[in-house]
Image (cartoon, rainbow, N blue to C red):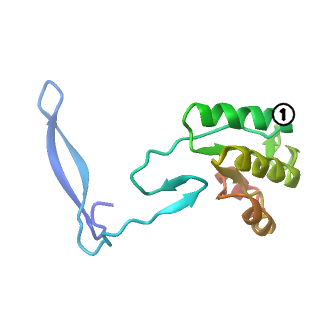
């Protein structure tokens, strides 16, 4: 990693015995200076705003996701995270609301103005999830199942 373009190193003193640690220093050569801003609801990821995502592992019911969305927004989070599927004990077995969960997340997003974030379970899900969600996540465990 130390030999990659744009990466330098520096040494600094730390600890009581004067041990030296090497830390990364990214050089600014050739790196674009403009910010990339991604909008999700009222949130601007990459801007000056601190972003917090919060929510349940799984969207279990309309009541649960609506109450959670209100609580998340009241606590200051700007993005609602909700899984449409809840992983079971086996990698290829899931429970949850699936595509109906997207509609529940969209309803919660509309009610609170927060952005929303959910997972993509396979490449065939991308189009459907893109219609409803602001942010799509592809988890490492999902890719291990070879469904993505």
Q: Nearer the viewer, residue 76 or 59?
A: 76
**62 left or right, relative to 69:** right
Residue 110 rendering spot, x and y as whole percentages: 72, 50
Which residue sits at x=75%, y=32%? Answer: 67
Percent x, y of residue 94: 85, 45
Does 59 appear above or below 49?
above
Above or below, 52 relative to 31: above
- What is the tally of numbered marks visible in this picture? 1
Query: Where is residue 71 drawn, in percent x and y?
Result: 66, 30
In the depicted structure, whether residue 16 falls above or below residue 108:
above
Q: Nearer the viewer, residue 148 or 134?
A: 134
Quarter location, residue 65:
top right
Asked whether residue 54 is in view, the answer is yes
Asked which secondary structure carries label 1, the reply is: helix
Q: Is residue 134 above or below residue 105?
A: below
The quadrant holding residue 76 is top right
Q: Quadrant of the N terminus?
A: bottom left
Pick the quarter of the image with the C terminus.
Answer: bottom right
Residue drawn at 13 percent across, 26 percent down = 17
Q: What residue is drawn where x is 81% and y is 68%?
A: 124
Most extreme residue toward the top is: 16
Q: Is residue 142 left or right of residue 46?
A: right
Q: Position of residue 9 (x, y in %)?
A: 20, 55
Q: Residues within 10 Å of mark 1 (few under 14, many from 20)?
A: few
Q: Is residue 58 left or right of residue 12?
A: right
Residue receiving disc 1: 63
Outermost bottom residue:
30
Say whether residue 132 is left or right of residue 23. right
Asked whether residue 146 appears in the rendered view, the answer is no
């Amino acid at each position: 990693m130390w030999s990659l373009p744009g990466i330098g190193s520096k040494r600094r003193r730390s600890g009581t015995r004067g041990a030296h640690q090497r830390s990364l220093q990214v050089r600014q050569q050739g790196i674009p200076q403009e910010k990339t801003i991604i909008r999700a609801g009222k949130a601007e990821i990459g801007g000056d705003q601190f972003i917090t995502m919060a929510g349940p592992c799984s969207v279990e019911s309309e009541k649960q996701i609506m109450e959670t969305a209100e609580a998340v927004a009241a606590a200051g989070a700007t993005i609602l995270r909700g899984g449409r599927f809840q992983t079971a004990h086996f990698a290829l077995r899931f429970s949850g609301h699936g595509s109906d969960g997207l509609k529940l997340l969209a309803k919660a997003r509309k009610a609170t103005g927060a952005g929303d974030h959910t997972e993509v379970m396979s490449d065939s899900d991308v189009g459907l999830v893109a219609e409803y969600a602001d942010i799509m996540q592809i988890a490492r465990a999902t890719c291990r199942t070879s469904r993505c």
